[in-house]
Image (tube, rainbow, N blue to C red):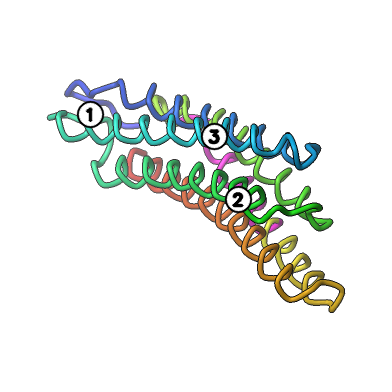
């Protein structure tokens, strides 16, 4: 990493770490949803909604800090993109939980558990990576592994779609379940966007 002759605003690092930790909270709520009966899902959705609001607050704090800082730790565009992509992850996870409750889904199809497991692992990796933005150390394995997980999520998503369209589900049920698995796939894509942004930042700072 090149030597800096000027000070940089360091609170961004803490805010990115807080955003990523909140995503871990969201992924745990998704895991909890898998084992919950219909009566418990509404309460899980409320907690997920609170986590999503906390994520919004964290994102707005980053944007406020960005707009009021003369010196930033890395490019302003990259700070904006990273904060936005972290926020997207929480939005998609909250949307998935909300859809399960709103659609009164009795049983999630086999394979959704694999989608959520991928998201939970990506959340852990992202939370571990954010503090390393301070030094740009030990980040290569992070973005490689998240990209691998996103490829795995793609495969699971395609298998789920094939399962949903095998003729065993009523048409209206297919529409409901497809929207849920599509949103979970978007969450996996958002994790990849975060990893790609981190890679871009690391390359620029090297």
Q: Is residue 156 magenta?
A: no
* Percent x, y of residue 22: 51, 29
Q: Residue at x 40, y 40 (%)?
A: 202
Of discs 2 and 1, which sits in the foreground? 2
The dot on residue 23 is: 3
Secondary structure beneath dot 2 equals helix
**Quick check: marks 1 and 3 in contact, CB under 8 Å?**
no
Q: Which residue is mark 2?
A: 96
Residue 118, given in percent of the width and then of the height, sits at 70, 46
Left or right: 3 in relation to 106: left
Direction from residue 6 to residue 98 in the image, left or right? right
Q: CA distance from mark 2 to mark 1?
A: 30 Å
Residue 69 image offset from top left, x and y in percent:
16, 28
Query: SS of the residue at dot 3?
Result: helix
Q: What residue appears at the point 82 percent right and 70 percent down from the top-left corner?
A: 163
Label 1 element class: helix
Q: Quadrant of residue 145?
A: top right
Q: Is residue 40 above or below residue 190?
A: above
Asked if residue 171 is positioned above or below residue 37 in the image, the reply reads below
Q: Which mark is residue 65?
A: 1
How many other residues sit within 10 Å of disc 1, few (<14), some (14-19) or many (≥20)? Answer: some
Mark nearer the N terminus (2 vs 1): 1
In the image, which residues are magenta?
A: 137-152
Residue displayed at 80% across by 56% down: 111
Instruction: Name which residue lies at 78% across and 54% down.
Output: 108
| Res. 38 image quadrant | top right
Along the line of sight, the residue nearer the viewer: 37 or 53:
37
Q: Which mark is residue 157?
A: none
């Amino acid at each position: 990493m090149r030597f800096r002759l000027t000070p940089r605003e360091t609170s961004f690092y803490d805010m990115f770490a807080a955003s990523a930790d909140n995503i871990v909270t969201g992924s745990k709520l998704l895991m909890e949803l898998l084992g919950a009966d219909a009566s418990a899902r509404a309460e899980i959705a409320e907690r997920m909604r609170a986590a999503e609001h906390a994520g919004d607050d964290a994102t707005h704090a980053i944007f406020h800090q960005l707009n009021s800082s003369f010196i930033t730790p890395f490019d302003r565009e990259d700070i904006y993109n990273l904060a936005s992509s972290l926020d997207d992850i929480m939005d998609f996870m909250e949307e998935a939980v909300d859809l399960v409750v709103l659609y009164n889904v009795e049983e999630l199809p086999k394979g959704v558990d694999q989608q959520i497991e991928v998201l939970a692992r990506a959340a852990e990796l992202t939370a571990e990576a954010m503090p390393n933005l301070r030094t740009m150390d030990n980040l290569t394995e992070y973005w490689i592994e998240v990209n691998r997980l996103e490829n795995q999520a793609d495969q699971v998503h395609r298998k789920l779609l094939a399962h949903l369209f095998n003729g065993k589900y009523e048409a209206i049920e297919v529409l409901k379940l497809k929207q849920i698995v599509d949103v979970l796939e978007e969450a996996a894509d958002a994790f990849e966007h975060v990893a790609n942004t981190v890679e871009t930042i690391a390359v620029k700072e090297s």
